[in-house]
Structures are given as C-alpha cells and as structure tokens.
Amino acid sequence: MKYLSMVVMLTFLFIACKEDNPDDAPIESESVAKVNSCEGCHTNYEHLKDVYTPDPPSTGGGGCGGDAPHYEPYDRVYLGGSGYETFKVTMHGRMECVKCHNGVDGTDDKELAHSGDFIKHPSKQSQEKCAGCHEQIVQRTTNSLHEQGWGQKRMVVIRGGYGTHPTDFDNLPEEMKEGYDVNCGKCHGTCGDCHVVRPSAGGGGLSNGHNFNRTPDMLNVCVACHVSRGGHAYLGQAVGTVPDVHLTKAGFVCIDCHSKNEIHGTGEIKETRYAMPTLPKCEYCHQNVEESNDYHVQHINTFNCNACHSQDYNNCGSCHIHGAGARIPAHQKFKIGINPIPELRPYKLATLRQSLSAPDSWKEYGVDNLANFDAFPTYKYTTPHNIIKWTVRTQVEEGKACYDACHIIKEEDVYRNKEYYLFESDLKDFEINATKHLCVDGKLPASWGVN
C-alpha cells in the first residue's frame, strides 16, 4: 500500500509538470532563477524585461562613426549564454558581484540593489577596483590615450583659450565638458570597454555574458570605435577601394601591429599617439627597403610611406557639436602636404586628412567661436590603414617615366596629378589662417610649374 501511494504521488507530479511544460522541453535554470540576488535577477531574462528602466532621450549625435547599434536595456545586462558559463568558473566569476559593483546583494528590490555606492562600470574606478590585482596595468592605462583622449582634449583646451596642456581640460565651462563627454568622449573608455562590455560606440552593454575577453575582438571592439577611418579603410568599405594588404595577405588583426603595451600606454601623458614610443613602424617588418626600387631611392626620407601606398581616405570637416553634425560631409580623398609634426616624424611631406573642427563647433554648448581656433591646422598628419603595394600614384603606363603618376605635370592648360596635393585653394575660408603653412604652394620643385 505504501509503495502504491508513492507511485500515485509521482504520477500526479509528472502530470502536473507536463501541463506546465506541454512541449516537454527542458526548463533552463535561467528561466526559473530566483530574483532575490544579483545573479538571480540578471540571469532571469523575463524578469529583466519586466523591471528594466527605458533609456533616456539621446542628448547628442552619433559621433564620428554614426549612431551606435541599439540594444535593449535588458539585453545589455543579461547574464546568459556560453560566455556567462565560462565567466562563472573564472577568478572574476567566483567573486561576489558587490566586490566590484558595490550595491546590495540578497534582495529582489531593484532600487535597493543599485543603491548607495553602486558602480555600473567598476573600471571607471580602476585604482580602487582593479589595481589590487592588476596594479601595473592600471598604472600604465591611467594616462593612456585610450582612456583619457588627451589629444582631443588638448585641441579643445588650446583652441578654446582655456589653457596650454590637455590637463587644463578642467578649465572648460561645465557645458563644454558635458558636450565633450557626450559627443567626443564616447570612444574613450576604461578597461571594461575593451575587455568586458561593448564600447558605447558599439551599443554598450555586456558583450559576452560578462566573460572577460583577454584579447578584444577586432570588429566588435576596435572597429566599433575606430570605424569612420580605421575600420572603414582597413576593410575596404569605400567605393573604389580594396581592403588593406595586411588584412588580405596576412590576416592581421589590430593587435598584430598595435601591441598591448602601446594600447595600455606608459603611464605618461602623451599629447598625440605619434609620440608613443611603442607605436608600430613600417620598417619593423619592411627592413632594408631604402634601395629596393627607384621610388624608395628618391623619396624614402622625403615622403612618409603612406604617400605612395595609401588609397583614398575618409575625410570630414566643420563638425557642429550637438548640432547639424559634419557640415562638410564625409568624403573620400587623398592629400599630401607639409608634415605638421616634424619633431616626431622626419619627413618633409606626408599624408594629411581633413579634421572635423570649425571655429563655431561648440556653439551649441555656449561658445560662439573658439578664441584660439588657428592654434591647430584643420588638416592632420595621418597614416591611413588602407595600404596596398600598387596605387594610382605608383603604377605608370609602359614607357612612361616613374614619376608620371605622382608628380604634377602640365599638359596644355591642365595640371595633372595636382589633386593629390594640398593647396590653399583647397581650403575653406575659416581654414586658411590655421592651415596654410601645411599647403604646398611655393614649396614644390620649380620644374613642376605650379608655384
């Protein structure tokens, strides 16, 4: 009788389970997770959808790379999939959530859980939250260009007349600092933006179930920020271009050239990436090329390598921060001008790209015109990531002189190849005073007949 009663009870439970789960599908632990803890809440997808807070209205444009992909708030914080399973058995995964994020565990009250000193992105307080285990890396990255954006800050500070050094950024009016954070700072982030979450420019939120990715994914992390020029060029996205030879022939991803030591920085403030001692150089791989062909013999110390080996490049200009965006829309072109950083690069002539600032770029943030706009040219030294061996400037028709495709040549009343060089006539009125010293007017060989 006792045995019969047990059979009846088990049969009843089985039938009840079948009714709750008619498809006889396995019930995932995530779908029945209790919500009275950090893990319980964030592994329960349906619960996250019930309690999520909608995103506030956008307060800025999409930045240089355009609008970021959209992920729902609950998707950005969901702990699930193989990434989360991997994370759970790692050193980071075995730590209590509040160890890094603070807040309150052991509650199903969302407001209480995220109260007090809760930190959404712990690596924003890396000295406190990361340095205990990763001291050397934190000390290196604190002043890195990736984390601080010193080059951008320097230009805003000096052009605005608020100081002479990027650390004078604090002198900016609060409204301008807010505008910088929303429009310019979105691509500069902390450790977590490369190793745990998607960068803001890539949509934000957990990228792999909270798993820490030692090597950032090139497309979803690097190109998410370096898209409008770096990724756009390297992948050959523009009409008339092809992918970079380092991708098609060698299959290189970013870190094959840009080492972690470069990306993490030296701990020192560098005002431009070209001042980084660990920045890769062509000659690291391409050695003994000085006399390998006539082009190199003639120009190895006059032009940077990109002047011959880059394709047309993505440019834009006259950006109106928070307003109409780039009033000179993105366009493909190629310009060679006077090297603006001879103290860092030895060439007389170099590839230049049009940058996005204009005197009234910050009008929407209380500054009608930048007081010291002409302190920096509107064209910048650039090293396009769209290298190929043979370009329109290195390929010449059979029987033609080696310089036929790159020197300026007068044919009747037309100057052929002139479009490759930056002349004052290429500049907008607001660019002339800032940029004319980089133009080649009066600085080319007299035999070219354009001076």
Image (spheres, helix red, strand yellow):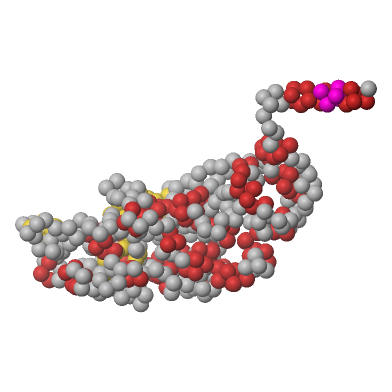
Tell me if residue 373 comes above or below residue 363 in the rendering: below
Query: What's drawn in magenta, residue-wise?
Result: 7-11
Tell me if residue 248 comes above or below residue 344 in the rendering: above
Residue 370 locus on image (x, y percent): 44, 63
Q: Is residue 202 visible?
A: yes
Whether residue 441 is in magenta: the answer is no
Where residue 172 sits, quadrant-wise, is: bottom right
Q: What is the total number of numbered labels drawn onto the structure image?
A: 0
Give the prevailing secondary structure in the magenta stretch. Answer: helix
Give whichever of 76, 185 is nearer the camera. Answer: 76
Where residue 102 sits, quadrant-wise, is: bottom right
Residue at (12% x, 66% y) in the render? 448
Residue 293 locus on image (x, y percent): 18, 68
* Quadrant of the drawing holding the C terminus: bottom left
Tell me if residue 76 comes above or below residue 120 in the rendering: above
Q: Is residue 260 left or right of residue 40?
A: left
